[in-house]
Amino acid sequence: MTDVRYLAPSTLDEAISAFVAAGSAARILAGGTDLLVQMRSGAVRPGVIIDIKKIAEMTSIQETSDGQFRIGAAVPGAVLAEHARFGRVWPGVLEAINLIGSTQVQGRASAGGNLCNGSPAGDSVPALVAAGATVMLQGPNGAREMPVEKVPAGPGRTTLLPGEIVVSFMLPPRPRGSGDAYLRMIPRTEMDIAVVGVGVSLTLQDGVCTAARIGLGAVAPTVLLVEAAAKALIGSRLEAKALEAAASACSAACRPIDDKRGTIAYRTKIAGVLLQRTARIAAKRAEGN
Amino acid sequence: MAKLHVSTTINGEPAEFLCEPTDTMLDALRGPLGLTGSKEGCASGDCGACSIMLDDRLVCSCLMLAAEAQGHELQTIEGMALGDKLHPLQQKFLETAALQCGICTSGMLVASDALLRKNPRPTEEEIRFWLAGNLCRCTGYDKIVRAVQETASEMAEAAQ
């Protein structure tokens, strides 16, 4: 306890220098809703805590003139919900982020933290994968961009290199007729961890699905991009047969655990059920755009 | 290792305190600052008994490092009443017995106040969703929800 250091740098360069210098002893502090719980339980004992919320690009939201969104990795869910445009363009991503924890947790918890925590059940991750979002990383060797689905490496682990920080998420411009949605199954009605989470983003032109991406959470060691499910939807009019094929593809992609929240059989079946429901919501939103 | 010196604003007044780098804001409130109205229930962000406002946003003080308060503005339950005059939510909780053991009460009040500032006329469902992160183990939720609703109507009438 005695030699822990708390740093709150105001630039990315300072944060990365400190992160590199401290090595594996350092932890990045965004909203703290996972880190402080892990510290309290003794699961994590950081030597250096690097609070990145004083770095402007980590906490800002921008919409570019070509319709891309850049979301700082430490932007809390409640702040994103108050953005005038984001929830209209990406309602599925927003509803996924806003499902994380309580009102109090929303005041602090961020999509960047949710991703870097590495939980297979993180709610924002399937929706961001479906959205085709990328992360902008900054590390000792410079900046690079990576699809969100490439970040998780397993429960509690990421593919980030030593000293790398997730700075922001980039969400691509939205073609007309696009919609997204996220649904999760939990045993309670609120404040629980997903048994299955499904994010769907799709584009409809004259009723035909021309593009789709499916993110599937809590049914494998990492959140999955289910390309076979997307293929089943693309070219269809989202008729029952296409939705059933996509549902089967989701169930086939599952490699879940058995635990108190859900058995392997249950999670595998629900993945398909939720895919159909989520796709219908995304399609309805797409029709309105 | 020297303690960290933190300068912040609590309930509108400048405040300074010393803390360890791993102390939570709740530790600082209940320890050096002597503000014991915020309660420790779970210490893991599940129960909401330690709810405070950080720059006008509702947070759990057990999920915030004390060092993070530097340069920010906090509001705690101790700042809710205006001198001797209770806040309408506090008055209503008393009148309608919207509490039993009282451990959750300060968190409930701070969270309810945050709701009414954002949404002065919430529906019952909106109140229940907003307060989903505030646990009452005496299971007195119905009285709490009704007290918030009644306060909202009275405050709206008084404002007209």
Image: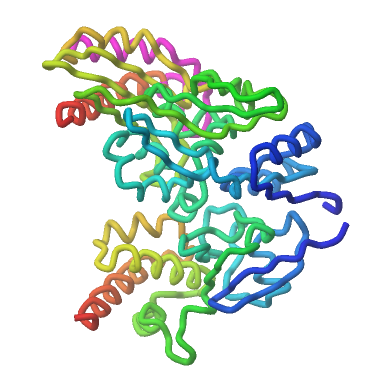
B138 within the magenta span: no
Q: Residue furthest right?
A: B1
The residue nearer to you, when weighing B157 against A257, is B157
What secondary structure is the stretch in magenta mostly built from? helix
A16 relative to B119 in the view: left or right: right
The residue nearer to you, when weighing A139 against A147, is A139
A250 within the magenta span: yes
The residue nearer to you, when weighing A224 against B71, is B71
B99 relative to A13 in the view: left or right: left
- The image shows residue A263 at horizontal and vertical percentages of 47, 25
- The image shows residue B105 at horizontal and vertical percentages of 48, 72
The residue located at (32%, 61%) in the rendering is B127
Is A73 situated above or below A281?
below
- The image shows residue B151 at horizontal and vertical percentages of 30, 76
Please state the extent of the stretch shown in magenta in the rendering.
A240-267
B60 relative to B159 in the view: left or right: right
Image-quadrant location for residue A246 = top left
The residue located at (33%, 68%) in the rendering is B116
The residue nearer to you, when weighing A287 against A99, is A287
Residue A32 visible in the snapshot? no
